Image: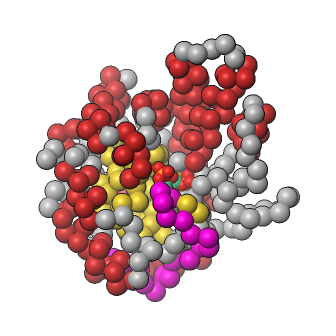
Amino acid sequence: MIHYKELGLVNSRELFKKAMQGKYAIPAFNFNNMEQLQAIITACVETKSPVILQVSKGARQYANQTMLQYMAKGAVELSKEMGCAVPIVLHLDHGDSFELAKSCIETGFSSVMIDGSHLPYEENILLTKKVVEYAHQFDVTVEAELGVLAGIEDEISSEHTHYTKPEEVEDFVKRTNVDSLAISIGTSHGAFKFKTKAGELPPPLRFDILEEVERRIPGFAIVLHGASSVPQNIVAEINKYGGKLENTCGVSEEQLRKAAKSAVCKVNIDSDGRLAMTAAIRKVFIEKPSEFDPRKYLGPARDALTELYKHKILNVLGSNNRA
Ligand code: G3H
Ligand code: 13P
Ligand code: ZN
């Protein structure tokens, strides 16, 4: 067992308290490899933002749990070396079992999500409570979910949105003692979020549900998943350089700005990073077909990611100068 404090990490409790008071949201960026991690840390150091490093079950399998432990420690050391020791959380994204959450806690995670949103309500409560009781012994914070987002995450997909029922949140939070709650108000996973026709605007987020949740559990940290905006200039760049992404659509950044000023303390962004990285790599492959040094295409991808993350922090979440 390695405790996250030995790696220099923090849990999310204090960060959420400050985000709630300061009316901003903490970025939760997913990563799978070194370049993504370097870009996240560079963007957070340059903007002085706290950060949640997210690892999905698939990402943990891809990167290897031992490797991840040292990468997280490396991220802490890198931020110090760059001159600003930003608070860093290592978080399990969409944990699907008690065993996975326990294993992450034992290998240095400071925060875990247990996603029982696909289960019947009482089963979601039982599973969440079990994880919370284990995690809190080690001062690890836990995120749960009520309501189901449309889209795909890991192997689980849902065709339709099932909005969070505000009448359930009070009971759920009280009975599970969970630290934060992901809710479903119309965001969705992936790069194809809404089936809108050309020229049509995507449906607005259900701020009425968010407000009712805030009224029922005042001061409680809310999480938004599926918050990528799928920038159309980046999608156009991918397609210009041989990609084929059609009918992509994301959540408007104006709506996310509004959400970040509410009880939403954590905003999850993965797909936008994937798109930025892909566009930069495709550009090099097309413009310089004789290039075969990975640094020559992963380097520009890392730069593009850093710019994207800085933009999210400065213009969408408002977490700059909060480290
Ligand atoms: O919500 C899911 C995240 O985007 C992680 O995706 O399971 O493909 O790593 P992944
Ligand atoms: P996006 O697919 O919108 O980036 O959502 C990521 C997410 O919710 C990770 O848990
Ligand atoms: Zn998610």
| Side (left or right) of 138 relative to 28 | left
Q: Position of residue 128 (x, y in %)?
A: 30, 72
Residue 257 is at least partly visible in this image: no
Q: Position of residue 50 (x, y in %)?
A: 39, 43
| Side (left or right) of 245 relative to 313 | right
Instruction: Compare residues 122 and 11 and report the one nearer the observer.
Output: 122
Quarter-wise, where is residue 102 in the image? bottom left
Task: Identify which residue is drawn at 66% across, 49% down.
Answer: 230
Q: In this view, does 239 lie above or below 112?
A: above
Give the colour scheme of this rendering: secondary structure
Task: Identify which residue is drawn at 27% across, 59% down.
Answer: 101
Task: Identify which residue is drawn at 53% across, 32% down.
Answer: 306
Instruction: Compare residues 214 and 242 and report the one nearer the observer.
Output: 242
Task: Identify which residue is drawn at 13% across, 47% down.
Answer: 1
Q: Position of residue 157 (x, y in %)?
A: 54, 65
Within the magenta stretch, is there residue 126? no
Instruction: Compare residues 90 and 117 and report the one nearer the observer.
Output: 117
Magenta span of residues: 153-174
Q: In this view, does 178 lie above or below 289?
A: below
